[in-house]
Amino acid sequence: MAQHLEGDWLELATASGNTIRVLKSAHPRARRLRLTVTPKGARVTYPHGTHPAQVSAFLRSHADWLEKKLDELNLVSQPLPPLRLGIDTEFPLRGEPTTLTWAEGAYPKVEPFEGGLTLVIPRPHTRALPVARGLLASYFENLMRRDVARWMATFVPQLGLAPTALKIRSMKSLWGSLDTRDRINLDLALALAPPAALRYVLAHELCHLRVRSHAPRFWAQVASIYPDWKEQRDWLRQNGSMLKAELDRLVADVAD
């Protein structure tokens, strides 16, 4: 498998005959070579001073995994239509098809209706799109917090442990995480997924309060509080790239 280096990109030829473009990035705090894949593409991060041959060898050794991951993310699909002021669009919300419409009003807000949401934007429209993105991000977060609060009331007594805080934000590749201070992070894109998928990710991160690894006893703990976890994990693996791409076009950087 040959590799061509040009600018900030690497081109990796795979055994199946495909060519994968990988963004290369030297990072001052990187301690090792790291390969990540998101709906925006593949990136290899490495410490300053890493020899190009090391980067090439690292990518070649992960070529099969990278090709499989990109195929799962379906990055060859047509890009989603961008969010445009006044133009109705469709997107999933809590796993259901949802129509987004626009209206003018005295102050910015989101007005739900059966099967959709209306973004109310006041004149003048000088910053209408950033305002609209912020409204959607806040609305999605509120939906998630409502669900999470209800499920935590069941999960926490079962585990006998509780997180110290909950943060909801856009995450590039993960669905959730638990930090060293027992704070849970959840991906905002889960607002677009069926509630059962969000519930699985919450149960997953809560169970890390007991078992920090993914050892068999961790999965046994997950099954004890959420028996349907495998079905939801598989659903996220099959549909996750679509959710993250949808969130990106709807809220973009305001989600951070």
Image (cartoon, grey):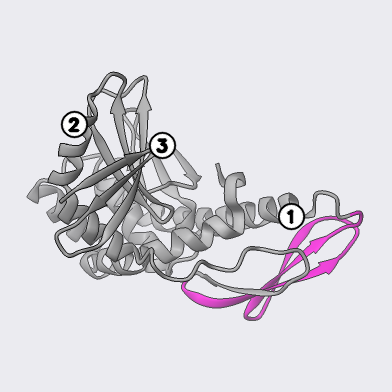
Report the Cα–Cα distance between label 3 and label 1: 33 Å
The quadrant where residue 177 appears: top left
Question: Residue 67, position in %: x, y?
Answer: 23, 58
Q: What is the spatial separation of the Cα atoms under label 3 and label 2, in whole angstroms?
A: 15 Å
The disc placed on residue 129 is 1
* Discs 1/2, front: 2
Image-quadrant location for residue 229: bottom left
**Real-space CA distance between mark 1 and mark 2, rounded to the nearest whole angstrom:** 44 Å
* Residue positioned most to the left: 216
Per the rendering, the mark at residue 7 is 3
Labels 3 and 2: the sequence-earlier one? 3
**Residue at the spot 16% in from the left edge and 45% down from the top edge:** 60
16 sits to left or right of 186: left
Q: Which residue is mark 2?
A: 53
Of the pair 28 and 22, the residue shown nearer to us? 22
* Residue 206 belongs to the span the image colors magenta: no
Q: How many residues crowd mark 1 within 10 Å: few (<14), some (14–19), many (20+)?
A: some
| Residue 140 vertical position relative to residue 173 in the rendered view, above or below | below
Residue 104 part of the magenta-drawn span: yes
Q: Position of residue 182 (x, y in %)?
A: 34, 33
Number of the label disc, if any, that sits on residue 8: none
Q: Are marks 1 and 2 in contact (CB under 8 Å)?
A: no
- Residue 162 visible (yes or no): no
The region drawn magenta spans 95-124
Three-letter amino acid code of the residue under disc 3 = Gly
Which is more N-terminal, label 1 or label 3? Answer: 3
